[in-house]
Image (cartoon, rainbow, N blue to C red):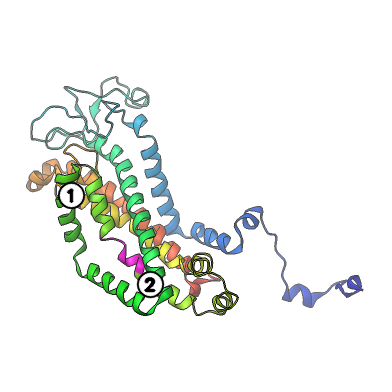
Amino acid sequence: MADSALPTGDNTLLRETTPLRDISGLERFLGPENYRILRGLLKTPASILGFILIALFIFIALAAPLIAPPLTPDDPYKIPRDGFTSEPRPMMSDWTRNAPPLPFWWKPIMKTDHWVHILGTSQGQYDVFYGIVWGTRTAFRTGFIVVIATFLIGIIVGSVSAYYGGAVDNIIMRVVDVFLTLPFILAALILAAVLTPKIGRSLIPSIIALITFGWMGYARVIRSDILSVKERDFIMAARVIGVKDSQILFRHIIPNAIFPTLVLASLGIGDVVLTFAALSFLGIGVNVGYADWGQVLSFARNWITSLNMYWYIIVWPGLTLTLFVMGWNLVGDALRDVLDPRMRGKT
């Protein structure tokens, strides 16, 4: 009986109303929605450029010991110095002292066995090339630590506030409002400056300061989405059958409301790295000579009026920082467009 109900012959109406397509193994593995998101990201020229930039920086971070071998393996983030004079030295100038070991690629490409300052030196004779290469690891470390921590704090605070509502929501949101009234960079600067004498000069004071004043945006975004999701029928049904609040919140509500917050987090990595570089530029946080893009830029402060001669000490670290932030912003913008319900069917 079931076989007789199947369409036979040239069923034009069925072929026109129910088009058939092959489903790839990747789509079966990821699921239709995740496959749509991945396909949308890989079809957008801006996101492709962003992924290329991010992949380039990931390669530099992973291959840093091969690209720029450290002079002291026990402290690879210490930028090697070629003397102590204040005046920067030009690009491709010779090393005169404390030259690091030659990388494997140097002789085949440069056709010489003498190491030089590829991008010149900054004030204090810190090698700019080494600072940029190893500063990539610092950027990824600080960016991911701060974004993951602020993301989790914001998700927990915003979810509890939105789900329980009432007095709980009012109290939590007033705390968020108090934090939002503080100028972000100024508050982070003050807290990092207070923590540095107690903890010591390292990445930790700046990371704590950025986490302390960086979670409120995630809390507000997830709260607004949960307020909408928690009124849907399947949430009401879960409450009726007696599902625990924690299970409803973390298994049903958050997975359906978290996508806008994920977009904000992808955009936040570049912002965190930029803010951390600003703190380093102002002399807060890491020790002098630590491989960090902000600190490499800070070595150029006394030579800003002479950039017609010493342009390389600010152009190369500044360009590196710009490309890193641009890569994350391009991917974040493309992810926002793909997850926008109004864009479905166009990606």
User: What whole-number distance in Å separates the C-alpha atoms at marks 2 and 1?
Assistant: 30 Å
When asked about the image quadrant of residue 263, the answer is: bottom left
Residue 180 appears at what percent x and percent y?
24, 69
Q: Which residue is drawn at the image coordinates 40% and 54% (left, top)?
A: 50
Given residues 280 and 340, the one toward you in this image is 280
Magenta span includes 47: no
Given residues 40 and 158, the one toward you in this image is 158
Q: Amino acid at mark 1?
A: Leu
Q: Amino acid at mark 2?
A: Ser
Q: Which mark is residue 161?
A: 2
Q: Is residue 43 left or right of residue 102?
A: right
Q: Which mark is residue 195?
A: 1
Q: Which residue is drawn at the image coordinates 7% and 44% (left, top)?
A: 302
User: Of marks 2 and 1, which one's residue comes earlier in the chain?
Assistant: 2
Residue 209 appears at what percent x and percent y?
23, 54
Residue sitting farthest toward the top:
113
Pointer 2: residues within 10 angstroms few (<14), some, or many (20+)?
many
Write the start and end of the magenta stretch as one range.
213-219
Pointer 1: residues within 10 angstroms few (<14), some, or many (20+)?
some
Residue 210 appears at what percent x and percent y?
26, 55
Q: Quarter holding the N terminus?
A: bottom right
Magenta span includes 218: yes
Q: Which residue is drawn at the image coordinates 65% and 57% (left, top)?
A: 28
Indicate the secondary structure of the residue bearing disc 1: helix
Q: Is residue 107 above or below residue 10?
A: above
Residue 275 appears at what percent x and percent y?
24, 55
Indicate the secondary structure of the residue bearing disc 2: helix
Q: Which mark is residue 92?
A: none
Q: Is residue 238 left or right of residue 199?
A: right
